[in-house]
């Protein structure tokens, strides 16, 4: 069974690029348009990893991570922030919320797949 990765990003082009990259690498992908959408989909699915943007409407990536970490089934699931933000304080905020890692956009497809393979054992 292939691993299922959720990608939460308010940019359709980013969701499309991430989805295409991950599907090419053999993963199943569930897309969410923001944190609230991701949270509603996660509670009804089995997800092995979450890739989330930081800045999104309705619920940002930090709040999404906190909410997901509060769910018993997802306390230890890998969560990667995929964002244009690179400030140390934002990274610290993400780590404090429970993020496993951080990828800066724009990303290289092989970099994304490499990180996914590393954290999704």
Image: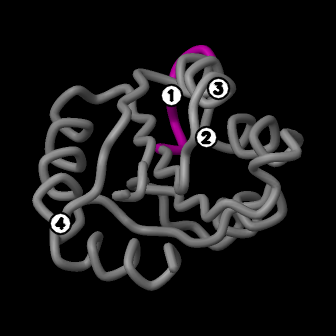
Q: Which mark is residue 25?
A: 4
The earlier-in-sequence mark between 3 and 1 is 3
Q: Which residue is mark 2?
A: 61
Q: Which mark is residue 100?
A: none
Residue displayed at 28% across by 29% down: 11
Q: Is residue 98 left or right of residue 6?
A: right
Q: CA distance from mark 4 to mark 1?
A: 26 Å
The spot of residue 110 in percent (x, y) is 17, 77
* Local SS, label 1: loop
Q: Is residue 80 left or right of residue 75?
A: left
Location of residue 10 (image quadrant): top left
Q: CA distance from mark 2 to mark 1?
A: 7 Å
| Front disc: 3 or 1 | 3
Dot 2 and dot 1 residues touching (CB under 8 Å): yes
Q: CA distance from mark 3 to mark 4?
A: 25 Å
The spot of residue 29 in percent (x, y) is 32, 42
Q: Which residue is mark 3?
A: 39
Q: Is residue 112 left or right of residue 99?
A: left
* Local SS, label 2: helix
The spot of residue 116 in percent (x, y) is 39, 72
Tell whether position 54 is magenta.
yes
Vertical placement of 121 versus 75: above or below?
below
Magenta residues (range): 53-58
* Local SS, label 3: helix
| Front disc: 2 or 4 | 4
Dot 4 and dot 1 residues touching (CB under 8 Å): no
Q: CA distance from mark 3 to mark 1?
A: 13 Å
């Amino acid at each position: 069974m292939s691993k299922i990765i959720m990608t939460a990003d308010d940019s359709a082009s980013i969701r499309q690029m991430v989805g295409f990259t991950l599907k090419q690498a053999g993963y199943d992908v569930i897309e969410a348009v923001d944190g609230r959408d991701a949270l509603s989909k996660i509670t009804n699915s089995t997800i092995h990893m979450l890739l989330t943007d930081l800045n999104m409407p309705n619920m940002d990536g930090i709040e999404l991570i906190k909410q997901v970490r509060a769910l018993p089934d997802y306390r230890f699931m890998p969560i990667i922030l995929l964002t244009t933000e690179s400030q140390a304080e934002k990274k610290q905020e993400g780590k404090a919320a429970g993020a496993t890692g951080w990828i800066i956009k724009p990303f290289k497809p092989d970099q994304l797949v490499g990180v996914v393979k590393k954290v999704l054992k």
